Amino acid sequence: MLFIAVDDLRTELGCYDNDHVISPNIDRLASQGVCFTRAYCQSGVCNPSRASLMTGLRPDTIRVWDLHTHFRDTAPDVVTLPQHFMRSGYHCGAIGKIYHNDLPDPLSWSEPRICIEGYPYDPDAVYRDDDNTEYLERRKADITAEGRSEHYIDPFGQWYLKASATECPDVPDNAYYDGAQTDVAMDKLGELAGRDEPFFFGVGYYRPHLPFNVPKRYWDMYDRDRIPLAENDYPPINVPPMAMNNLRELTGYTDMRDVRHPLEGKLNEQDSRLLKHGYLASVTYVDAQVGKLLARLEELGIADNTIVVLWGDNGWKLGEHASWCKMTNFETDTRVPLIVRSPGIAPGVRSQFVEFVDVYPTLCQLAGLDVPDDLEGVSVAGIMRDPSTAGKGAARSQFLRSGIWRAPDGRDYMGYTIRTNEYRYVEWFDWESGDLAARELYDHRVDSQENENVVDRPEHAAVAAELSRILKSGE
């Protein structure tokens, strides 16, 4: 099992009908496997999304809703996906970001997670451009002089600071962490292929997470002036304020500190093009690394008996709704790429709903393992084998608007959403009182971009009531 996680990868790929994106290796994997076009994560942010997929349990069950809670603190006895494979005779290893980067789970692996010397514990913000590295050295000196350095240094003694939101120096792929870890991962695959027992190997990529720092040659593959920008660069009509992300993830970078809340205005075209250029270049960079892994399987002669899974942990807004980043319940944040290539299963596209909680039982069935009884997802291995198999009627996600991402009124809200064939329905609850604070309804029959909240229209009252019932019942 080669288990590839990609941070903040949305469905803007060639295999999802986006011709302007250069993703030949992921596209080829999709053509050789099953590409799910309606896969949804359980939360539009890294930690709860990953914890949910890896445990097969929903965020409310494991009580993981933010970036700081480790599922072992709230559900200590849960058996994770790789743990189950270990107990079934697999040797399990990982490199990169599988769980949330600073919340690893040693119990999931047969050996310590592979780390690369010289990179910080959280290697998102690694800079190679001279101006950026000089800025960071000045910041380090200032912070040290003020006696505040401990807060900015990770457990490996590495600094974690941010400069600009993008850079593109002329450096080799392995100048950044994703390229360096691919070199290590290819060697590791050779070792794993020589073992007597089967293996489960997780490789987690950090791009296209911000900052969009990748080698120049990937930037040069795109003409910035021809990159299509979001058509719906405005907030949805009648949107409740807590439904919108405040973009704190973006404003942490030196050149994006003046970005306003989406309800106050949109990013200018120059910066919009810069960010989207950086995102697409980052996707193409990761695509090249995926290609190296797939080629390594072929070289080792194990491609025909290795299940390959590729998934993005959440979507990402690229100017839609005047917004950037993730952390909402909109389609752009909850819909994700999911591709599974499994020996003996014919390639094809599947449009049935699949949720991240379904990945755990699916991989168990594909590998011929027992499926634990306590999982909250259902296997879609049958859908993979027979495209006429009926799927579930809806997908569910949730997001806790709290902490530095809290709503404009300063309160915290939990939003629950259900996506059906025709609608997306959302309910927001005050996190302290539990009172219903707002609702959303988007009619995908006429509004696939979710540009108008029609929940208060009389003609939609019956639909909203029924979706509210289903959302509460868990059907």
Image (spheres, grey):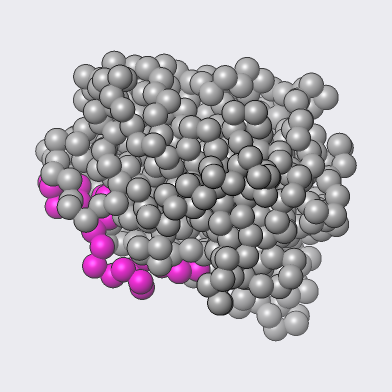
In the rendered view, tell whether residue 184 sits above or below residue 433: above
Q: Residue at x 61, y 21 (%)?
A: 18
Q: Is residue 422 left or right of residue 70?
A: right
Q: Is residue 186 left or right of residue 12?
A: left
Q: Which residues are magenta?
A: 68-89
- Across and down, in percent, residue 405 comes to 66, 64
- Across and down, in percent, residue 301 comes to 25, 21
In the rendered view, tell whether residue 251 sits above or below residue 412: above
Query: Which image quarter: residue 31?
Result: top left
In the rendered view, tell whether residue 276 sits above or below residue 25: below
Q: Residue at x 71, y 41 (%)?
A: 452
Q: Residue at x 50, y 68 (%)?
A: 68
Q: Is residue 148 highlighted in magenta?
A: no
- Across and down, in percent, residue 281 comes to 66, 32
Q: Is residue 75 highlighted in magenta?
A: yes
In the rendered view, tell whether residue 44 sits above or below residue 203: below
Which residue occupies the foreground of this view, 300 or 103?
A: 103
Quadrant in the picture for the N terminus: top left
Query: Which image quarter: residue 159?
Result: bottom right
